[in-house]
Image (cartoon, helix red, strand yellow):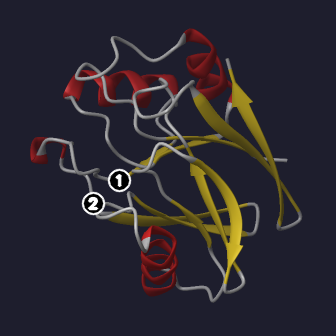
Amino acid sequence: MPRVAIVSDTHVPSREHAVPDWVGDELERADHAIHAGDFDSQRAYDRIAALANGELTAVRGNTDPPTLGLPHTDTFEIGGVTFAVTHGAGSPAGWQRRVVETARAESVTAEPVAVAGHTHEVVDTTIDGLRVLNPGSATGAAPADRATMYVVTVTDGTLTVELRTE
């Protein structure tokens, strides 16, 4: 049963000083990690990548420096499930529709799991048959009111999604 740790919007150091220890623990325990953008710095990226033990899928958020060299979208498969990752930048109006359209356009499978960030709002919903996950902000960066992330286990192509918070 692969474990996937999903985080986003860490905003270190612009809004928060560091990734909370409990988030780091979850990243280290995971078989794979996803960061849906807005690291804010090379230091934050390096820290997340080290915690993920090299098993990191990360995309560029609207506050990330171009020097990170991250793609705007990425996809990967684990345990029979395809994840399509994007930041979801832009206006909050239409965010879900943009994320679904991007996930479908970028994925080789018809029904990927769409993972995005940007709003700092926890989302686990289905739009037009596509599961959409937003883990909120892993550091509780405003406008979030607390640090949140998802831990997903994949069993025979089926997801179990658990919200973790401090």
Q: Quadrant of residue 21?
A: top right
Q: Which residue is identified by label 2? A: 71
* In this picture, residue 76 sits left or right of residue 160: left
> Camera-side residue: 97 or 102?
97
Residue occupying image coordinates x 49% and y 76%: 103
**124 and 36: which one is in front?**
124
Residue 2's place in the image compared with 131, above or below, is above
Query: Which amino acid type corresponds to the residue marked 1 in the rendered image?
Result: Val
Mark 2 Cα shell of 10 Å, populated few (<14), some (14-19), many (≥20): some
Three-letter code, disc 2? Pro
Instruction: Report x, y in % for residue 108.
Output: 53, 85
Q: CA distance from mark 1 to mark 2?
A: 5 Å
Quarter location, residue 123: bottom right
Q: Residue at x 28, y 52 (%)?
A: 60
Q: Residue at x 31, y 31 (%)?
A: 45
Residue 118 position, x and y percent, is 39, 50
| Helix, strand or loop at mark 2 | loop
Residue wearing tag 1: 59
